[in-house]
Image (cartoon, grey):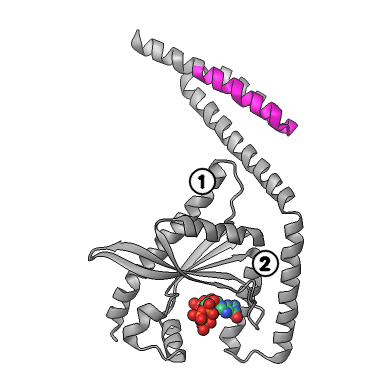
């Protein structure tokens, strides 16, 4: 097959990876905007390398004409969660979407691979719009915790050096590490709700501070500078108190002041 043809083949997969990462990143953004805990910590994606596609086809005896049907992970998205419980939530989010149709799932969390690999895989159908019209392609979503990802990334890097023959003394260490990862994920789950609360509080404070700063910036345009400097100093004083209730009260007062200036500005525009 010519190299140009490969480019054409992978092009819709490149688009799918871009779109899917954007969509999942946007979900994180939506949760943050609404001061809610995001079950997704981070997202990344890749298009499988040509050599890796060829290797898989050779290993699984896949003919070229069956490549796009049988190599299901040409487009691959990795979704990282903080806690094991979030994985189910993310799978449910995917199941409820109209733009991603689940073809199959592999639960390597309930059924850990002999290597120690743990992750939840979904193969989805996803349609991209190309210059030749819509193309329904497949993509693999790997959903795993940060701890599972740490293990998988290290183990995967060893596969490059040793292929399938990782020395025994390393595999046994990796197996111990896999057990430690299970224990770590379990331990983190016991403090999940406390961690979630802390993260939501910090996100809420971050959003509130952003809102206050935006309001102060807008006031610069509408009111006299000395007044704004006084408001800003008051903000620094309240911020240093590290008291969310005070910050919320200040934000509400600022809203009222800003509203007053906006009304004044409209009045003077009309007169
Ligand atoms: P890449 O692109 O380098 O990630 P397989 O026969 O396992 O190759 P199958 O049955 O189609 O393929 O899918 P499976 O077993 O669900 O695995 C697909 C992907 O999961 C792999 O992609 C890896 O990314 C990951 N994975 C599966 N098993 C392991 C494992 O033991 N260790 C690590 N680190 N990752 C694993 P590829 O094909 O390896 O390619």
Neighbours of disc 2 within 10 Å: few (<14), some (14-19), many (20+): many
Is residue 139 or residue 91 the one in the foreground?
91
Q: Which quadrant: the N terminus?
A: bottom left
Neighbours of disc 1 within 10 Å: few (<14), some (14-19), many (20+): few
Q: Position of residue 144 (x, y in %)?
A: 60, 66
- Can see residue 58? yes
- Reply above or below: 228 against 15: above
Residue where numbered disc 2 is placed: 147
Q: Is residue 136 left or right of residue 17?
A: left
Tell me which segment is drawn in magenta: 238-259
Q: Residue at the spot x=36%, y=78% of the render?
A: 68
Q: Is residue 242 magenta?
A: yes
Q: CA distance from mark 1 to mark 2?
A: 25 Å
Q: Which quadrant: the C terminus?
A: top left
Q: How many marks?
A: 2
Q: Position of residue 118 (x, y in %)?
A: 63, 73
Q: Residue at the spot x=59%, y=54% of the render?
A: 39
Residue where numbered disc 1 is placed: 30
- Reply above or below: 265 against 195: above
Q: Main secondary structure of the magenta part?
A: helix
Q: Is residue 155 left or right of residue 55?
A: right
Q: Position of residue 209 (x, y in %)?
A: 61, 34
Is residue 148 or residue 260 the one in the foreground?
148
The furthest residue to the top: 271
SS for dot 1: helix
Q: Residue at the spot x=72%, y=50% of the render?
A: 193
- Can see residue 233? no
Q: Residue at the spot x=47%, y=20% of the render?
A: 222
- Reply above or below: 76 against 216: below
Q: Is residue 83 magenta?
A: no
Q: Is residue 238 left or right of residue 90?
A: right
């Amino acid at each position: 097959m010519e190299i140009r043809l490969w480019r054409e083949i992978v092009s819709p997969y490149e688009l799918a990876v871009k779109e899917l990462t954007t969509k999942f990143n946007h979900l994180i953004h939506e949760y943050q905007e609404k001061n809610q805990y995001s079950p997704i910590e981070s997202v990344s994606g890749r298009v499988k390398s040509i050599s890796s596609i060829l290797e898989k086809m050779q290993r699984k005896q896949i003919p070229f004409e069956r490549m796009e049907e049988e190599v299901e992970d040409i487009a691959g998205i990795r979704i990282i969660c903080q806690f094991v419980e979030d994985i189910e939530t993310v799978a449910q989010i995917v199941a409820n979407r109209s733009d991603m149709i689940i073809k199959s799932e592999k639960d390597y969390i309930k059924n850990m691979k002999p290597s120690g690999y743990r992750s939840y895989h979904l193969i989805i159908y996803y349609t991209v719009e190309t210059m030749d019209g819509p193309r329904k392609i497949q993509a693999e979503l790997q959903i795993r915790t940060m701890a599972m990802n740490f293990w998988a990334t290290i183990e995967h890097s060893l596969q490059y050096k040793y292929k399938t023959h990782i020395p025994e003394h390393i595999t046994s260490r990796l197996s111990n590490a896999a057990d430690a990862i299970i224990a770590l994920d379990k331990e983190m789950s016991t403090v999940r709700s406390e961690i979630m609360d802390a993260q939501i509080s910090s996100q809420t404070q971050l959003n509130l501070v952003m809102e206050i700063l935006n309001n102060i910036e807008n006031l610069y345009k509408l009111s006299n500078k000395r007044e704004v400097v006084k408001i800003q100093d008051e903000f620094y004083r309240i911020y240093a108190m590290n008291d969310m209730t005070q910050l919320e009260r200040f934000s509400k007062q600022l809203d009222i002041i800003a509203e007053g200036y906006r009304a004044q500005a409209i009045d003077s525009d009309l007169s």
